[in-house]
Image: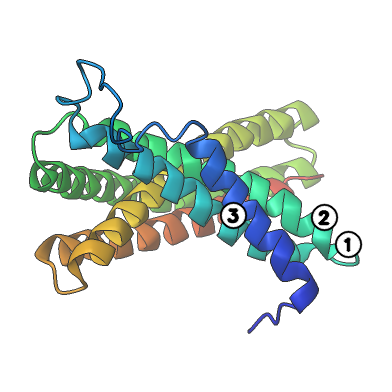
Amino acid sequence: MTISLPKAILPTLVACVLAAGCQSNPSKNDDPVVSGDTPEPTTSTRSSGSSDATRTRTEGAAMGALLGGLLGYALGGDNRTTGTLIGAAAGAGVGYLVGNEIAERKQKYATEEDFLNSEIASAKEYNDTATAYNDQLREDIVQLEKRAGLLESRYRAGMASRDEVQAERASLKEQIASVDKVYEDLKKEYDIKVAVAAERKQAKGGDDIYVQQLEDEISSLKENMDQLQAQSVQLAQIDERLTI
């Protein structure tokens, strides 16, 4: 579906993006020293890492504001201007957090390639863990469905108490909460990997080996997240079945 933005909303959206960028670097600490000024002793030795970190945070906030603003506009109903502002603010916050996390991770490595290799390796670990978790959860759901069906039949036959049913539901709700937490952790890492891949792709192009490896892992992460979300829905359906 294509969303057509009226001209009236564009200044609001652009302002949100610009505000996010300014907020990320309000004092413009990375500006060069004005000619004729006496530089501080640390100026000549300041590494490019500081500038890169600031840029990463700023770009994250700006992109988050843009995407959040678009989403807010689409879901804003009768008050789409307000929806755009709220969405942009929320998106800028999330984008800044992602950018800040990436900047902090980069500082741990001597080269960008070392950083990228680490991100690819961690993505693989997340995928391995998520795949194993999904496989085990799939088996658990089969057993939970059988147990819920038996408990429902016993309750209707007067052979199980309401307390037993409520205890089973409480256990299900705990498992749903656990699954949702795993999903949130995967989503956080997914957002970071997407941002890292996008930054590298912008600099080196889509044929870059690091971009390709990251995008492969990102695709697998998305599949694992979708499976996890679907299984969370199945658990909720089992819980609903026991609403008796």
**Residue type, label 3:** Val
Query: What residue lies at 75% left-to-right and 77% top-to-bottom?
Result: 7
Q: Tell whether label 1 touches label 2 (CB within 8 Å).
A: yes
Distance between the Cα atoms at labels 2 and 1? 6 Å
Q: Position of residue 143 (x, y in %)?
A: 47, 48
Judging by the rendered image, the residue that carries numbered circle 3 is 17
Q: Residue furthest front?
A: 36
Query: What residue lies at 27% left-to-right and 45% top-to-bottom?
Result: 126
Which tag, 3 or 1, sits closer to the chain's start? 3
Q: Quadrant of residue 211?
A: bottom left
Judging by the rendered image, the residue that carries numbered circle 2 is 82
Q: Tell whether label 1 touches label 3 (CB within 8 Å).
A: no
Query: What residue lies at 64% left-to-right and 45% top-to-bottom?
Result: 90
> Mark 3 against mark 1, which lies toward the viewer?
3
> In the structure shown, which secondary structural element does the residue marked by tag 1 occupy?
loop
* Tag of residue 141: none
> Mark 3 against mark 2, which lies toward the viewer?
3
> In the structure shown, which secondary structural element does the residue marked by tag 3 occupy?
helix
Distance between the Cα atoms at labels 3 and 2? 15 Å
Q: Position of residue 182 (x, y in %)?
A: 44, 39
Residue 95 can be seen, yes or no: yes
* Tag of residue 79: 1
Which tag, 3 or 2, sits closer to the chain's start? 3
